[in-house]
């Protein structure tokens, strides 16, 4: 059995959203005109179980990052619920909210903008423990996490500009691991990296899911990247979940128009690569 499917199939969701909707007010087109509204998320149901790796794909602007902001609790939904371990994170009380904030960590697309350029890596890694007021032997924890992401302890004294994009994304993953999360949310974690190092970061995420028993929510606009890392994929389009399925089924028999477009994009990229190889 592969690692990504080794969780109990009947386990209850660890992180879940129910009927989640969000509307943004846009800027007026004309003075005194009503502000146009944009329904960024429309009645979304989404969940991930303990140890499960789930994908979320959709074209740019479909609402993926907005959903990430809801899943990590940085933005409160206009409608619907976000539940961690079965309890609403907005109404479940202070102790539960603290547990949720510690247990769900995020890795963003661009590690150069998510790490403070003036901070040594060691300081950046300790930051989540400080802001979440987590006690313990932080020095030991830092070394443990560096090892998990395949970095040497020399990294601690250095500054972000001294690293390549791939190494920086490892550091961002390490920082997300510091509080000991149960769920890792990766929002386009390899989109800003050179193609040649994307696979290393994808493999690292896969290994972490297997070795630490983490749940992973992997977000991308590229279906093939998601298919490689997850066992179940949600397809998003214009703020709605339009299809859910196993990656291979989505490739073979895409139902929704948005899924067909994503499959088409992958195939045309491959055809292009093959064309280049022949040229
Ligand atoms: N704070 C905001 N105010 C108004 N519109 C926003 C805001 N944030 C995002 N949007 C719009 O919401 C839509 C979804 O954006 P986003 O969640 O970033 O999509 P994705 O991550 O899939 O590319 C886009 O049309 C975007 O322009
Ligand atoms: Mg996005």
Image (cartoon, helix red, strand yellow):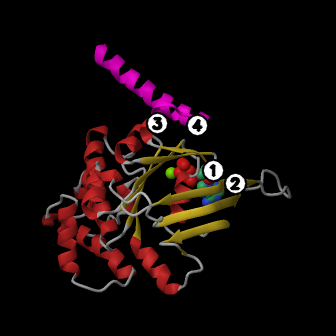
Residue 49 is a magenta residue: no
Residue highlighted by disc 3 = 249
Image: magenta residue range: 251-279
User: In terms of secondary structure, where does tag 4 sit?
Assistant: helix
Identify the residue at image location x=39%, y=22%.
272
Neighbours of disc 3 within 10 Å: few (<14), some (14-19), many (20+): few
Tag in front: 1 or 3: 3
Using the image, tell me which numbered label, if any, was put on residue 258.
Answer: 4
Using the image, tell me which numbered label, if any, was put on residue 11.
Answer: none
In percent of width and height, residue 140 lies at: 17, 77
Tag in front: 2 or 3: 3
Question: For disc 1, does the CB lie below 8 Å from ligand 1?
Answer: yes
Q: How many marks?
A: 4
Neighbours of disc 1 within 10 Å: few (<14), some (14-19), many (20+): many
Residue highlighted by disc 1 = 239
In percent of width and height, residue 33 lies at: 85, 55
Q: Are marks 2 and 1 in contact (CB under 8 Å)?
A: yes
Q: Earlier in the sequence, mark 1 or mark 3?
A: 1
Relative to 278, say whether 108 is above or below: below
Q: Which residue occupies the extreme right position in the image?
A: 32
Q: Are marks 1 and 3 in contact (CB under 8 Å)?
A: no
Disc 3 from disc 4: Cα separation: 14 Å
Identify the residue at image location x=30%, y=55%.
169
Point out the image quarter for the C terminus. top left
Residue highlighted by disc 2 = 39
User: In terms of secondary structure, where does tag 2 sit?
Assistant: strand
Q: Is residue 152 left or right of residue 263?
A: left
Disc 1 from disc 3: Cα separation: 22 Å
Question: For disc 2, does the CB lie below 8 Å from ligand 1?
Answer: no
In percent of width and height, residue 132 lies at: 39, 80
Neighbours of disc 2 within 10 Å: few (<14), some (14-19), many (20+): some
Q: Dominant secondary structure of the magenta stretch? A: helix
């Amino acid at each position: 059995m592969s690692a990504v499917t080794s969780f109990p199939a009947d386990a209850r969701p660890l992180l879940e959203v129910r009927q989640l909707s969000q509307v943004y007010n846009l800027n007026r087109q004309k003075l005194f005109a009503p502000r146009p509204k944009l329904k960024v998320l429309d009645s979304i149901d989404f969940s991930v179980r303990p140890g499960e790796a789930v994908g979320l794909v959709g074209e740019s602007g479909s609402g993926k990052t907005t959903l990430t902001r809801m899943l990590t609790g940085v933005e409160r939904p206009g409608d619907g619920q976000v539940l961690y371990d079965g309890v609403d994170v907005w109404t479940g009380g202070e102790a539960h909210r603290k547990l949720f904030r510690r247990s769900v960590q995020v890795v963003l697309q661009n590690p150069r903008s998510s790490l403070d350029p003036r901070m040594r890596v060691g300081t950046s890694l300790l930051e989540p423990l400080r802001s979440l007021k987590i006690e313990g032997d932080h020095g030991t924890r830092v070394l443990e996490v560096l090892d998990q992401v395949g970095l040497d302890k020399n990294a601690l004294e250095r500054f972000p500009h001294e690293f390549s994009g791939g190494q920086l994304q490892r550091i961002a993953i390490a920082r997300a691991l510091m509080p000991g999360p149960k769920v890792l949310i990766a929002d386009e974690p390899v989109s800003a990296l050179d193609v040649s190092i994307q696979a290393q970061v994808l493999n690292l995420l896969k290994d972490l899911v297997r070795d630490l028993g983490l749940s992973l929510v992997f977000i991308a606009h590229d279906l093939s990247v998601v298919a490689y890392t997850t066992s179940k994929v949600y397809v998003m389009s214009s703020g709605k979940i339009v299809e859910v399925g196993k990656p291979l089924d989505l490739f073979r028999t895409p139902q929704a128009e948005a899924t067909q477009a994503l499959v088409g994009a992958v195939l045309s990229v491959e055809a292009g690569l093959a064309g280049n190889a022949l040229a």
